[in-house]
Amino acid sequence: GISESFDVATDMVTLLTIENFTSIALDDETQDVVVLFHETDSEKSRHLAPYYKRVALRFKELNIESVRIARYDLRNSPLPRRFESYDMAIPSLVILPAFSKFPPFRFFSDVFKVATVMQWIETHASVKIKLPELAHLNDEEKKLFKEQIKEREMHRMQKEEL
């Protein structure tokens, strides 16, 4: 599968540390903060990175400012005290809704793909957002996707005629 690292300079993903976690993830009640707890050198984390970076990019491209996509590297910072009582698998994805920064926290437990993560955020965000159809795709990708669907449908119909 695809495997990448995060890059502070080019990603749309906010890097959280023990020093800034409270001010960014907990104190800001205007934003729903989605946090990926990961370990830089973990193969599982590296496999999630391209999808998670894409989630952050799509929220930015859609101009949804009420959602902050962040990550917390447990190799460089200890687990924040609020999460110490959780037996978290690493990597773990959690949402800290704008109006509810206290336990119980909501953890993502579906297939980690861009569309499913975006839909999960839409469902659990305190600041209500409405994602467009195929929100995980930009306009050019939507066009290509719809063309591909048409081609598949035509191919299926041709096979049925035989």
Image (tube, rainbow, N blue to C red):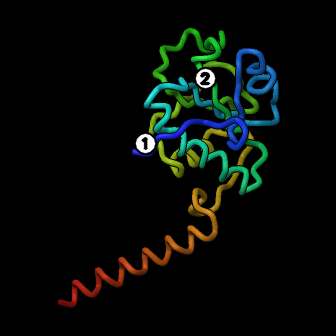
x and y, in percent, of residue 125 in the image? 67, 40
Q: Residue at x 60, y 24 (%)?
A: 105
Indicate whether 113 appears above or below 132: above
Q: Amino acid at mark 1?
A: Val
The residue at which mark 1 appears reads as: 111
Indicate whether 135 appears above or below 6: below
When asked about the image quadrant of residue 71, the answer is top right
How far separated are the C-alphas under marks 2 and 1? 21 Å
x and y, in percent, of residue 58 in the image? 65, 53
Whether residue 24 sits left or right of residue 131 in the image: it is right
The residue at which mark 2 appears reads as: 73
Q: Residue furthest bottom?
A: 161
Q: Nearer the viewer, residue 145 or 83?
A: 145
x and y, in percent, of residue 135 in the image? 60, 58
When asked about the image quadrant of residue 151, the answer is bottom left
The residue mark sitting in front, 2 or 1, is 2
Q: Amino acid at mark 2?
A: Asp
On residue 136, the disc is: none
Q: Residues within 10 Å of mark 2 (few under 14, many from 20)?
A: many
x and y, in percent, of residue 25 in the image? 74, 26
Whether residue 4 sits left or right of residue 16 in the image: it is left
